[in-house]
Amino acid sequence: MIDRDHGLSVNRQANILGIGRGSVYYRPRPVSTADLKLMYRIVLVA
């Protein structure tokens, strides 16, 4: 939804959309294999 090439600044676009500017720049990190295995084991026990 944010257009980095638009005339409005990213900050202004985020404000209009009602989202935090920090969430625009957030890039999720991939989950490690070890974490995935642990999460899988937790789900099986629960």
Image (cartoon, rainbow, N blue to C red):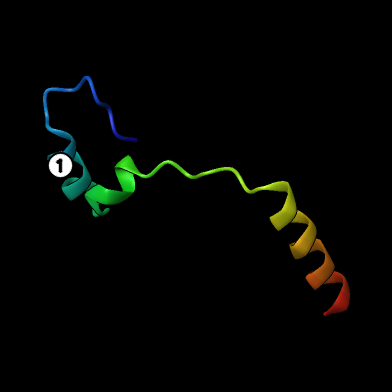
Viewer-proximal residue, 15 or 36?
Answer: 36
Q: Which residue is mark 1?
A: 11
Q: Which quadrant would residue 26 be assigned to in this image?
A: top left
Determine whether the residue tagged by mark 1 lies in a helix, strand or loop. Answer: helix
User: Tag 1: Cα neighbours inside 10 Å, few (<14), some, or many (≥20)?
Assistant: some
Against 9, residue 6 (above or below) is: above
Question: Which quadrant is home to the N terminus?
Answer: top left
Q: In this view, which residue lies farthest toward the front?
A: 34
Residue 42 lies, in percent from the top left, at: 79, 72
> Going 15% across and 42% down the picture, which residue do you hit?
11
Q: Is residue 32 left or right of residue 39?
A: left
Q: Is residue 16 above or below residue 3?
A: below
Above or below: residue 11 compared with residue 34: above
Judged from this view, the residue extending furthest toward the top is: 5
- Residue at left offset 24%, top offset 54%: 18
Residue 10, located in which quarter of the rendered image? top left
Give the amino acid at mark 1.
Asn
Residue at image position (27%, 53%) is: 19
